[in-house]
Image (cartoon, rainbow, N blue to C red):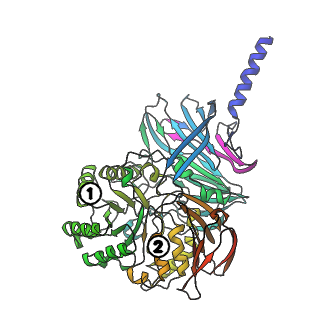
Amino acid sequence: MTAYRSTALLVVGMACAHAHAAPLTSPDRHISVAVAVSPSGTLTYSVSRDGKPVLLPSELGLQLQGADLSGKLRLSSSSPVKPVRDAYELATAKKRRIAYRANEQTYTVRNAQGQAMDVVFRASNDGVAFRYLVRDPKLPHKQFVAESTSFAFDKSAKAWLQPMSVAQTGWMNTNPSYEEHYRREIAVGTPSPMASGWVFPALFRSGDTWVALTEAGMDGSFHASRLQAESPGGVYRIGAPAAPEVYTDGALLAEAQGTLATPWRVIALGSLRTLVESTLGTDLAAPAIAFDKAQVKPGHASWSWALLKDDATVMDVQKQFVDYAADMRWDYTLVDADWDRKIGYEKMSELVRYAAKKDIGILVWYNSSGAWNKTEYSPKGAILSREQRRREFARLRGMGVKGVKIDFFAGDGKSMIAYYVDILEDAARAGLLVNFHGATLPRGWSRTYPNLMTAEAIRGLEFTTFEQVDQDAVVRHAAMLPFARNLFDPMDFTPMVFGDIPNIKRATRNGFELAESVLFLSGIQHFAERPEGMATVPAYVKRFLQELPRSWDDVRFIDGYPGSHAIVARRAGQAWYVAGINADGAERTVELDLSFAGSRAGTLIADGDGERAFTQAPIRAGKTTISIKPHGGFVAVFK
């Protein structure tokens, strides 16, 4: 009887342990994740920071054809906690040398039919990530149906979110392209104004903790996700792409033979400084494919289309922009849409040779699209198949072209994500750099594919040249980007105009525009300003842009608030560059702690008294106070 009772108690004890596993903590023990199965069989997790709830119990689970792994589950086992250590380098990010440390634990659950699913959790000092693995051999073909993942916030939390545009809307049916304005500091639970939901990264504040939700680890085998439009009670759920978001006749949702692995669901959390300095979005991405490091060349580019539009894509103008790039000591000139018709391949080869003599590389535009939208810009239909791409990319490489800008993608379906990955791999094979426009969020691709220099996925400067309403909105929009879109992935906003924009009254001062050159991260920064506008700035501003680093070694968050102002420091070698913008309509005085710059001498470039005026002055390291004019900005350099 005693032996029987002891055995029974052991079984009950194991069952309780499996129903509520011991918390997984970050290496510094500030972040804790608790995984549990409810009495009804729902798998949940919750996240806390320093003992305070950040995410309330939130659901986990998948539904596959022939396997419901979202309910009536039991926790069959949890692995021992193991440390994860990784180190890598990035030339297109906020830091060059990155060390990732986390604790990992795998939880295995089974449904009533005995079918198994693993949920792998990692806790690092700057957040939490998890992914699902379904490898049960009793289910050889795994077809995704739905995901139960949710993120439950306290009702007092606030959100800064960008709506996901509806597929097949917008100019020439080119949506979705991650190009909407952010809704700032809204109550959690506020429905999206668009039925498609909200894009990643999604920013929240719960108490004194900031949270950024995104995903990483996209290898072409899974569709990209977003947050659903409805979030009753502050509970946000993973959403799937819409039916049109596919490569022609391609798959919308994930499926796999063997193992079905989802991307990592990433929850960066901590202070605002922790988020701005975090690299979690690339830490969870796959390691880099083989690509010659000598060909990974971040840089700055001249670009005629931003202000001059279609008519400038002609040989004479492009030569002028090559000369302009050479004068600015930049690296590239981007030749935009219809170059094949207005310049032609033969003349393009001539332009490439002309540019090469001035040590300027040529980048050329392509239309990605087949049947998924109504765009007519060309080259179109030239890179749809692998055979076409490899032939076209080999031709470009033979001409001496350095990279491609590829535009007008269809969205986030599995087949479209696979198309992105195929392009990156074929471009890498040809030694070409890549810039995606009219595109999805890169989700860590810049780590996996070192030839990916940048991607748009933002309502960039070009929109401010179309309508005054976008120009008026750009100051607060730009002050969102270091905290959301540009947190983890390079962003081709195409910043900086000092002169006039045709038919538009600029809303920003010149200091604001100059600060974007440091504040915004892009492997290749395509500057919008044309030679005539650059000719109006003082020599010291021009010199600043001539000497601006191509990539950064480190980052420090100084001050800021999403949609209001942002001040960030970046280091290149031994030099520190500090940039700040003020989106408010009143002058802002800020106290800066610049002691990290040591004893280096500093130079401040800021707005002068006129709307287009600059001023230059010395600035000391250590603690100092500066004033930023309304819609203005500054840069400071310590060498």
Q: Is 535 a magenta residue?
A: no
Residue 245 in percent (x, y) is at 41, 56
- The quarter of the image holding the C terminus is bottom right
Q: Is 57 a magenta residue?
A: yes
Q: Crowding at label 1, few (<14), some or many (≥20) Cα neighbours within 10 Å?
A: some
The vertical placement of 84 against 507, above or below, is above
- The quarter of the image holding the N terminus is top right
Residue at the farthest bottom position: 610
Q: Element at badge 2? A: helix
Q: Nearer the viewer, residue 545 or 109?
A: 545
The vertical placement of 148 against 116, above or below, is below
Q: Which residue is mark 2?
A: 545
Q: Is residue 589 left or right of residue 636?
A: right
Residue 207 in percent (x, y) is at 73, 58
Residue 153 in percent (x, y) is at 68, 54
Give the dominant element type of the magenta stretch: helix, strand or loop.
strand
Query: Which amino acid is tagged 1?
Result: Arg
Closer to the N terminus: mark 2 or mark 1?
Answer: 1
Could you tell me how far apart the alpha carbons at marks 2 and 1 are, in whole angstroms?
29 Å
Q: Nearer the viewer, residue 334 or 484?
A: 334
Q: Which residues are magenta?
A: 43-67
Quadrant in which residue 368 is drawn? bottom left
Quadrant in which residue 298 is drawn? bottom left
Q: Residue at x 34, y 60 (%)?
A: 372
Residue at the farthest right position: 2
Query: Which amino acid is tagged 2?
Result: Leu
Image depth: mark 2 or mark 1 in front: 2
Q: Is residue 192 visible?
A: no
Residue at the farthest left position: 346
Q: Which residue is mark 1?
A: 397
